[in-house]
Image (tube, grey):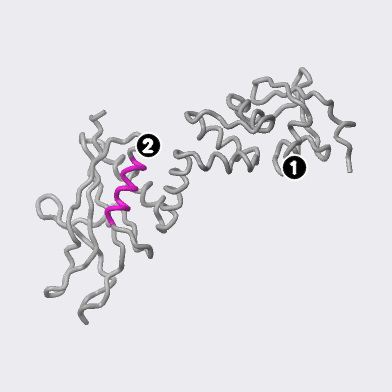
Amino acid sequence: MTDNSEKFPAIIELNVGGRFFTTTLLTLTKCSDNMLSAMFSGKYSVIKDKDGRYFIDADGEHFIHILNYLRYGDLPPVEIAETVYREAAYFGVHGLVSQLEKFPQILAKIQRNNFRKLFNGYSECLNSIIKTAGEETLSQTSVVKVLIFAKENDTPHEDFNLDHTCTCLDIGENLKTADSSIGPWKIETTEKDVLNCLMFDLQKQGFTVTSRFHGPCTYKIETIQCRKSFYSISFHWWRT
């Protein structure tokens, strides 16, 4: 095994994305299962900048919080926890990652991501909504029709076509197909919950949007109607 002290000095000068830090080899190799420990294990060649500092290609703004966790076990202030969490994950500092995942804003983000994963095609649906809204250039408001359904239709009537194209009534009683759709899913959650998730993500990206239930699919056989529902998501380009 390579002796670290033979390759690296006890005091380490670092250049992390253009910001300079001084620490010890002992601090950097304290935890054996992260990227920093691997870099200074003696098994790899570590590049230096023109002044001889060991260079790490990362955002140096919050690197001090990585060091302080390794030094003292300190956690960052709540207001920058998300940014430090990203850096901790990048450097593979698993203990810090685990601690930060207990912070409310990070735990909430994890829960939201886990919720989205329950719906096949969620990201595609969200991107399709944004793309469709952006194609309307002559209006102060763009309205996107989204078909959201928890379950597929069953077969309540022998003539009911399960493969029909869902349509809704639009302006002037014209039939319109969905601009985007999502469903079905297996968990016990409502269409409104999924719509709220879509709205949250759109608002998080900076869009000013409102939504409403538009109506059921118009397809029916006798008195048996399709159970799938249309929702309208309106993008308000002139509102702030």
Point out residue 174 in the picture as x, y percentages from the top left corner: 13, 55
Indicate which disc residue 205 carries.
2
Question: What kind of residue is marked 2?
Answer: Gln
Q: Nearer the viewer, residue 221 or 228?
A: 228
Task: Name the chief secondary structure element in magenta.
Answer: helix
Q: Earlier in the sequence, mark 1 or mark 2?
A: 1
Relative to residue 147, is residue 59 drawn left or right?
right
Q: Residue furthest top?
A: 51
Vertical order, 141 against 183 (above or below): above
The residue pinned by badge 1 equals 32
Task: Look at the image and tell me in which quarter the C terminus lies.
Answer: top left
User: Residue shown at 29%/42% (left/top)?
Assistant: 133
In the image, 180: left or right of 174? Answer: right
Q: Quadrant of residue 26?
A: top right
Q: Residue at x 34, y 34 (%)?
A: 206
In the image shown, does 105 or 16 lie closer to the viewer? Answer: 105
Segment colored magenta: 191-202
- Say whether residue 75 is magenta: no
Does the magenta segment cover residue 197? yes
Q: Indicate whether 82 appears above or below 98.
A: above
